Amino acid sequence: VDKVVDASARPEALRAMLNELSSAERADMEYLVTNMLAADRDTMSLELLKENVAYARLVREKYEWAKTLPKEVYQHDVLPFHVVDEVRDAWRKELYEMFAPAVDTCKTMYDAVCAVNANIPQLTGVHYNTKREKTNQSPRESMRQGMASCTGLAILLVDAYRAVGIPARFAGTASWHDNRGNHSWTEVWLDGQWRV
């Protein structure tokens, strides 16, 4: 979290940051700042926001599947820095560096989806385990522990996909029909529709 002594200085710090960005990054940052929760806008590290935008823009320009995404899909399902209410940490650069080698030779988004999915346990070291510290873990929290439940795994997979320009979102059910608990999973936007 940025150290801001006077809360009134935050808008000026945001304006100064916007002026440092390229026009494409500035448009992405303006979208995030306009649509983010007030608590995030008031307290999030500006360096974390800048890194998020820089790497989102990098993959938007690098991968063919990301280049052709509709603007709204990119903004809603690749650019965001969080999935639900997990800790806001700097996951995007780290996950990009982990997964880019696995997707750099992929010709299609489908191939990239398969490459991320096939490599996530080995590259992150995270496996399903309900003994994790909490439900809604950030990627770094899950990787530190080497474990996550379905919710933490869904967050991690959404962020891994987004880190390489694949639109992804979190989905789930609050309760099974037999009241045995909830379940979470990840969906990707592929061939113009959401798929599990």
Image (cartoon, rainbow, N blue to C red):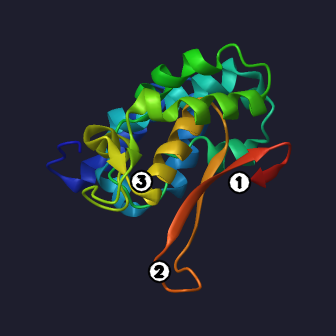
Disc with the residue nearer the chain's start (3 vs 1): 3
**Residue 103 at x, y percent in the picture:** 64, 21
| Residue 145 visible in image | yes
Determine if residue 51 is in view.
Answer: no
- As helix, strand or loop, the secondary structure at mark 2 comes to loop
Image depth: mark 2 or mark 1 in front? 2
- Check disc 3 and give the amino acid type: Gly
**Which one is nearer the viewer's eye here, 185 or 36?**
185
Q: Residue furthest right?
A: 191
According to the picture, the residue beneath numbered tag 2 turns out to be 180
Q: Read off the residue under disc 1.
A: 196
**151 or 5: which is nearer to us?**
151
Identify which residue is drawn at 23% across, 55% down. 7
| Residue in the picture at 53% in, 36% down | 160
- Tell me which residue sits at (78%, 37%) in the image: 69
Residue 119 vertical position relative to residue 82 in the rendered view, above or below: above
Q: Residue at 41% of width from left, 32% of height from top?
A: 124
- Indicate left or right for 16 with 185 as reference: left
For the residues labelled 2 and 3, say whether their Cβ atoms are less than 8 Å apart.
no
Residue 152: assigned label: 3
Where is residue 96? Give x, y as percent: 50, 25
